[in-house]
Amino acid sequence: MNQLLECVPNYSEGRDLSVIEQLCDCFRGKPGVRLLDYTWDHDHNRCVLTIVGEPEPLRDAVVESVGKAVALIDMTKHQGQHPRMGCVDVIPFIPIRGTTLGDADRIAKETARLAAQKYGQPFFLYERSATAPHRVNLAEVRKGQFEGMAEKMKDPMWRPDFGPDTIHPTGGVTAIGARMPLIAYNINLDTPNVEIASAIAKTIRHLNGGFRYCKAMGVHLADRNLAQVSMNLTDFTQTAMYRVFETVKMEARRYGVNVLGSEIVGLVPQQALLDCAAYYLQLEKFDGQQVLENRL
């Protein structure tokens, strides 16, 4: 595979493993495509797949998965902590090797066109593929969620880029586009009080004056009775994981709570972890080529 794109589709199902496995089957055993990882969460009621592949085979497999999601996931019955607007909530394409953002953008648009034609699912282009400034930010596109999206789409400013002009009755609507690598990073607190997590999220996210490449919200994890600061770091080279982690620890002390731990959802660029190691170990003149595996 000389040309590789990564795709990290998010599906609105995190409780029925049989559905999750059927979604994964769309990428298993396909020439030119490799399923690297999949994770799911009961509280968020969401699963995240990480796939790499050659542009066209990857496109075709993603289109197949959209059809599977439309057939198996009914958004009128969906409940979960994570904001969502469709059975396939968001489909980002990321350049990995021998590809550019332009390649990712082309494949995103081809995927949206084909899936809309085959399954009647509407698509908004977002991030680097957005057709207007107000569609760049996924949070703005998703605002209103599934329940409010049909009314929102009556506004000409929110007509989809591909597909019908209103939501699919059970599939909702999907955001799709090209972007750079993103880290889904969550920090758990030793309190069930989600208001504290939400207050911390407000402090660190860019929307409210926090870190430029951080999106954050507070979530209650019912199965553990904990509050979580759930984040997307959209450019780890500018907003480092360790910097966000230390800030959340500092802000948590204001409320008399502590950080229990953190988690990464899906895959993460190696450099992001090396940056954390260099920071916490206070390494001097450290270079990634000092990592044994990088020299093999």
Image (spheres, rainbow, N blue to C red):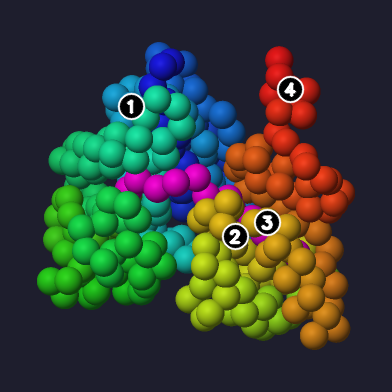
- Segment tinted magenta in the rendering: 177-189
Tag 1: amino acid: Pro
Tag 4: amino acid: Glu
The answer to which quarter of the image holds residue 218 is bottom right
The answer to which quarter of the image holds residue 168 is bottom left
Tag 2: amino acid: Thr
Is disc 4 placed on a helix, strand or loop?
helix
Is disc 3 placed on a helix, strand or loop?
helix
Q: Do the residues labelled 3 and 2 touch (CB within 8 Å)?
A: no
The dot on residue 91 is: none
Residue at the disc numbered 4: 293
Mark 3 vs 4, N-terminal side: 3
Question: What residue is at 52 percent from the left and 27 percent from the top?
Answer: 35
In the picture, the quarter occupied by the N terminus is top left
Mark toward the viewer: 4 or 1: 4
Residue 84 appearing in the image:
yes
Question: What residue is at 71 percent from the left and 81 percent from the top?
Answer: 196
Image coordinates of residue 68 in percent, x first then y, are 36, 37
Mark 4 vs 1, N-terminal side: 1
Residue at the disc numbered 2: 239
Tag 3: amino acid: Met
Compared to residue 70, the image places residue 211 above or below, namely below
How far, Cα to Cα, is label 4 from label 2? Answer: 25 Å
How far, Cα to Cα, is label 3 from label 1? Answer: 30 Å
Residue at the disc numbered 1: 55
Mark 1 vs 2, N-terminal side: 1
Mark toward the viewer: 3 or 1: 3
Classed neighbour count for the residue bearing mark 4: other residues with Cα under 10 Å, few (<14), some (14–19), many (≥20): few
Image coordinates of residue 81 in percent, x first then y, are 56, 66
